[in-house]
């Protein structure tokens, strides 16, 4: 068995794919109605149309939509990467559990983390 991709549900697959393509320096490889993938290089990342998408709540409280996964993105400069992600449409999450990690929310509300390894 081979894991080939992580798939994020969104009401706007093309828009979210463009966001992550810019953020990660990748290209849109497949662009079909309801399904968009990034390529080449890096782990597989795809975006699927979910017309009734409900963004997860971070951090989750009782009765909130639960986060199913998040993406970790290693960066060289946390401050610069945070600003760049914001310029593309991401938001800084209100709750930040660590000083050396920045929890962000993509345009569809999926959490992702920016971090430095050093």
Image (cartoon, helix red, strand yellow):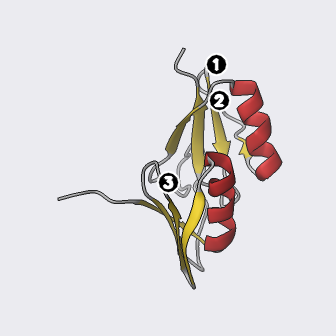
Q: Nearer the viewer, mark 1 or mark 2?
A: 1
> First in sequence: mark 2 or mark 3?
3
Assign a secondary structure to mark 2: loop
Where is 72 relative to 33, above or below?
Answer: above
- The answer to whether mark 3 and mark 1 are in CB contact below 8 A is no
Question: Which residue in the structure is indicated by mark 2?
Answer: 96
Q: Position of residue 19 (x, y in %)?
A: 69, 57
> First in sequence: mark 3 or mark 1?
3
- The answer to whether mark 2 and mark 3 are in CB contact below 8 A is no
Which residue is situated farthest in the right direction here?
Answer: 87
Q: Position of residue 91 (x, y in %)?
A: 75, 46
Where is 107 relative to 11, above or below?
Answer: above
Q: Position of residue 31 (x, y in %)?
A: 57, 77
* Residue at the image point whose x is 57% and y is 85% from the top: 33
Q: Determine which of the numbered discs, if any, sits on residue 77 in the image.
A: none
Front-most of 11 and 46? 46
Question: Which residue in the structure is indicated by mark 1?
Answer: 99
Q: Crowding at label 2, few (<14), some or many (≥20) Cα neighbours within 10 Å?
A: some
* Residue at the image point whose x is 61% and y is 20% from the top: 100
* Residue at the image point whose x is 61% and y is 30% from the top: 75
Question: Which residue in the structure is indicated by mark 3?
Answer: 66
Q: Nearer the viewer, mark 2 or mark 3?
A: 2
Q: Position of residue 95 (x, y in %)?
A: 67, 34
Where is 41 relative to 83, above or below?
Answer: below
Assign a secondary structure to mark 3: loop
Assign a secondary structure to mark 1: loop
Q: In 3D space, how far apart are the residues under numbered discs 2 and 3 (Cα atoms)? A: 17 Å
Q: Which quadrant of the view contains residue 12?
A: bottom right
- The answer to whether mark 1 and mark 2 are in CB contact below 8 A is yes
């Amino acid at each position: 068995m081979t894991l080939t991709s992580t798939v994020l549900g969104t009401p706007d697959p093309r828009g979210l794919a463009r966001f992550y393509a810019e953020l990660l320096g990748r290209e849109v490889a497949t662009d079909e109605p309801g399904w968009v993938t990034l390529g080449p290089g890096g782990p597989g990342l795809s975006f699927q149309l979910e017309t009734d998408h409900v963004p997860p709540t971070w951090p989750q409280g009782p009765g909130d939509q639960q986060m199913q996964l998040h993406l970790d993105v290693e960066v060289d400069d946390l401050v610069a990467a945070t600003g760049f992600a914001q310029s593309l449409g991401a938001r800084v999450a209100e709750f930040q559990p660590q000083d050396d990690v920045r929890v962000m929310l993509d345009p569809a509300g999926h959490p992702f983390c920016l971090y430095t390894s050093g």
